Structures are given as structure tokens and as C-alpha cells.
């Protein structure tokens, strides 16, 4: 990291745009993507990820307390802005992280805002004051991001096609969220959806600007992998809760073991068989990679909640509650739809065995969630474990994929 920042301008990799910002102790570059060079996550990025561990934990509690269709909708409405906050700061850091003191202080402020957002999650749908706290916290998270892009806009002239589009799109989204803080429930929730839609669409309609300021196609997959580890870590924590509540009874331990095997299968599928090479092209394939991870990360989290519900059901009599079975199956389906869409759009309309088996298995789990919610818990999990094990077997017979895309 330091070698890149201190290198003379003549040594900067092709495709790297630089700007300068004055500090008391000299000048540093405001960097963007280093094309052709692998870049690992910085210590600040890893520190930043820690606050999202808290956010994911709070989100699982929302679904655990209401494993119903309404609970799934509330979970989704909260998960999307939390996840999107991480994505936006990650892409900013990929292009413009120069690790100076000003940037560090801004990111520490952003972490405090995300922590505030996290503790507002449980009461976001509890009434007027709870919704207002969540809205204001997210509004502050977005304002800090806009401040970062204003800094980049001023110091990196060649990045202005990108920063202008992002300031416009994310700025409009922030305005909508700010208005939502002034609107009573339930009307503010409609503004949440509108603001989130504006923000999610901004990179999609900015493809030409993104092409002019490319991101690092080895660094971004690593960052998405780290968020995958965050949600898998929450699943492991939920499994530990299931073990603690089981009283070490054999039946419940078998269910917890099944839940852990499902998580292990998800880890295996993501890190061995999700191709990162689509990021070389932002149009469609790169977009599918990024937005597909919303379903991957959300699906893993929901599956973990379903696993704990399964353990609780085993403690109470061996059958999954009518709402718990669909949670487990639909979480697996969302995960498979995410990894399936990423691969399908990469290989083309006709697809291949991997893409159609992922999507087909996801569709089967949807049907199973609708029809099989009352099955014995162990049997339900056995079907899910067998399904993902078969998918991994199919994947292992296919050609190897690129996990960290390269420009070479």
C-alpha cells in the first residue's frame, strides 16, 4: 500500500488517475484503480467491515422474531440499505483510498454512523420514532459518502465523469431519505423504497462513466468474499446458539450439524465456483456479479436464521414450524438464484449445466419451501444438504473458474 502511494508519478500503472490534496505534512495522491496490479484489502477496510458484523447480527434478529412473509419483507427492506452502504463505500475505497489522515477520519465517522444505523434496525418498523432513527442514521451514512465523492471530484479531474454521476444519483437518493425522515409511518416506507431504487440504479445507468474510471478487478472480488465471510460468520454464531440451547440432545445436535453443512456447502460453492471474471466488463456481466451478491449474501443470512429455527423446532418436538421451513428453503433458493444469475449472464442466454443446475435447484427449493414446511426437521435439512452437495459435485466436473479477475 505505502509503496503505491509514495511512488513517483512516472511509475503509476497505466489506467491509474491521480490527484493531489494538501495536508500539513505534504501531499499525497488520491488514487483510483491500479490496473494490472493485485491489491489486497487494507487494514482500514478490514476494520470498516467489523461494524457490519453488528449490522448483520441485528438483521438476523429481525427475522428470528418474525419468521413470516411480513418478517421477510421487513428483513429485506432493512438488509438492502445496509448491504448497499457497504458496497458503495467499498467501491469508493477501491478507486480513491489514499489512506491519509483525512480519509481515515472520514471513514471512522462513517463507521460510527453505520453502528448507529445497526442499533436502529430492531425498531425500524416499531413505530414513528424507530423509523425516524433508522432513516436519519442511513441519511448520515449517505451524506458522508457524498462528502467523500465531493473530495474525489475536486482533486481528481479525470474522474469527474464518474463522480458527477454518482453525486447526482446518490445525492437524489439522499434527498429522498432526508424527506422520509420528515414523513410519518407508513408513508416513509414508500420513500425508503424510492430512495433505495434510485441509489441501486445509479451505477447501472452510469456504465460509460464507470468505464472511464475502472475499478480494480482483483480487489473487488476479494472484498465481496470478505462480506461473504461476515454473513457466514453470523451463520456459525447462530449454529452455536442452537448448540447452547439444545442441552446436547442428539436430535438437536444432528439438526445443527445439518445447518452447518449447508453453510459449508454455500462457502464451498462461492469460493470455488463463482467466477469473478465478469467484472472485466461492467455492462450486464459485471452488474450481475455485483447485484447478484445481494441475493448471495441475503440468502446466506436467511438460511442461517432458518437453521436456528430448525434447531429450536427440534428442541420442541422435531417438526419445523410452518413459517420456519420456508425461511430455510427460501434462503437457499435466494442464494442459488444469486450464484446462478451471475453465471448465466456470464456464459450467455443458452447457459450451461452449471447455470441451469443452480437455477433449477433454487426453483426446486422454492417449491419445497411452499409444500414441505411441515416435514420433520431432520428430513428437511437432509434434502437441503443433499441438494447443495449434488450441486457441488456438478460444479467440480466443470472447468475451473477465475476467482480474482485479472487484466493480464
Image (cartoon, rainbow, N blue to C red):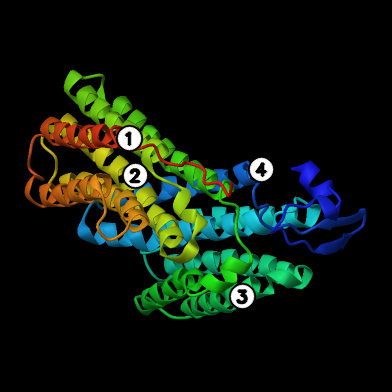
Q: Between disc 2 and disc 3, whose residue precedes?
A: 3
The reply, left or right, for residue 159 in relation to residue 79 is right
Position in image of residue 284 (x %, y %): 41, 64
**Can you tell which of label 4 and label 2 is closer to the viewer?**
4
Looking at the picture, does residue 22 appear above or below residue 265? below
Q: Residues within 10 Å of mark 3 (few under 14, many from 20)?
A: many
Dividing the picture into quarters, in which one does residue 18 lie?
bottom right
Answer yes or no: is residue 123 visible.
no
Foreground pick, 210 / 105:
210
Residue 45 in the image, given as x and y percentages of width and height: 62, 46
Check disc 2 and report the residue beneath it.
300
Question: Are discs 1 and 2 less than 8 Å apart at CB?
Answer: yes
Mark 4 crowdedness (10 Å alpha carbons): few <14, some 14-19, many ≥20: some
Q: Is residue 74 visible?
A: yes
**C-alpha gap between disc 4 and disc 1:** 27 Å
Q: Quadrant of the N terminus?
A: top right
Residue 214's image quarter? Answer: bottom right
Q: Mark 1 and mark 3: span between their CA atoms?
A: 38 Å
Residue 384 placed where, x, y %? 19, 37
Residue pointed to by mark 3: 167
Q: Earlier in the sequence, mark 1 or mark 3?
A: 3
Residue named by callout 4:
42
Which element type, helix, strand or loop, lies under badge 1? helix
Question: Going from the N terminus, do you reach mark 4 or mark 2 first?
Answer: 4
Amino acid at each position: 500500500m505505502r509503496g503505491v502511494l509514495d511512488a513517483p508519478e512516472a511509475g503509476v500503472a497505466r489506467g491509474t488517475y491521480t490527484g493531489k490534496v494538501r495536508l500539513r505534512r505534504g501531499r499525497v495522491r488520491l488514487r483510483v484503480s491500479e490496473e494490472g496490479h493485485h491489491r489486497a484489502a487494507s487494514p482500514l477496510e478490514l476494520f470498516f467491515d467489523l461494524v457490519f458484523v453488528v449490522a448483520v447480527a441485528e438483521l438476523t434478529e429481525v427475522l428470528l422474531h418474525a419468521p413470516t412473509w411480513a418478517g421477510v419483507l421487513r428483513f429485506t427492506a432493512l438488509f438492502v440499505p445496509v448491504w448497499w452502504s457497504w458496497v458503495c463505500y467499498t467501491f469508493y475505497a477501491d478507486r480513491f483510498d489514499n489512506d491519509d489522515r483525512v480519509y481515515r477520519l472520514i471513514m471512522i465517522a462513517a463507521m460510527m454512523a453505520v453502528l448507529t444505523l445497526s442499533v436502529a434496525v430492531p425498531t425500524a418498523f416499531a413505530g414513528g420514532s424507530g423509523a425516524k432513527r433508522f432513516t436519519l442514521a442511513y441519511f448520515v451514512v449517505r451524506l458522508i459518502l457524498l462528502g467523500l465523492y465531493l473530495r474525489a471530484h475536486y482533486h481528481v479531474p479525470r474522474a469527474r465523469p464518474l463522480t458527477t454521476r454518482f453525486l447526482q444519483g446518490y445525492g437524489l437518493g439522499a434527498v429522498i431519505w432526508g424527506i422520509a425522515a420528515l414523513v410519518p409511518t407508513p408513508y416513509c416506507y414508500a420513500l425508503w423504497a424510492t430512495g433505495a431504487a434510485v441509489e441501486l440504479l445509479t451505477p447501472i445507468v452510469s456504465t460509460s462513466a464507470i468505464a472511464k474510471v475502472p475499478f480494480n478487478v482483483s480487489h473487488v472480488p476479494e472484498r465481496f468474499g470478505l462480506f461473504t465471510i461476515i454473513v457466514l460468520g453470523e451463520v456459525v454464531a447462530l449454529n452455536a446458539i442452537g448448540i447452547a440451547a439444545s442441552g446436547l440432545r442428539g436430535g438437536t445436535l444432528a439438526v445443527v450439524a445439518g445447518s452447518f453443512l449447508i453453510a459449508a456447502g454455500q462457502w464451498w460453492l462461492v469460493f470455488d465456483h463463482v467466477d469473478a471474471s465478469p467484472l472485466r466488463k461492467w455492462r450486464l456481466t459485471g452488474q450481475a456479479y455485483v447485484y447478484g451478491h445481494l441475493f448471495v449474501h441475503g440468502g446466506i443470512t436467511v438460511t442461517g436464521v432458518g437453521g436456528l429455527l430448525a434447531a429450536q423446532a427440534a428442541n420442541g418436538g422435531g417438526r419445523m414450524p410452518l413459517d420456519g421451513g420456508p425461511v430455510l428453503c427460501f434462503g437457499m433458493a435466494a442464494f442459488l438464484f444469486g450464484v446462478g444469475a451471475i453465471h448465466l449472464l456470464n456464459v450467455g442466454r443458452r447457459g450451461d449445466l452449471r447455470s441451469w443446475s443452480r437455477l433449477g435447484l433454487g426453483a426446486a427449493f422454492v417449491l419445497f419451501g411452499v409444500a414441505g414446511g411441515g416435514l420433520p426437521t431432520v428430513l428437511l435439512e437432509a434434502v437441503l444438504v443433499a441438494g447443495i452437495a449434488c450441486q457441488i459435485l456438478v460444479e467440480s466436473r466443470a472447468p475451473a473458474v477465475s476467482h480474482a479477475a485479472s487484466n493480464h
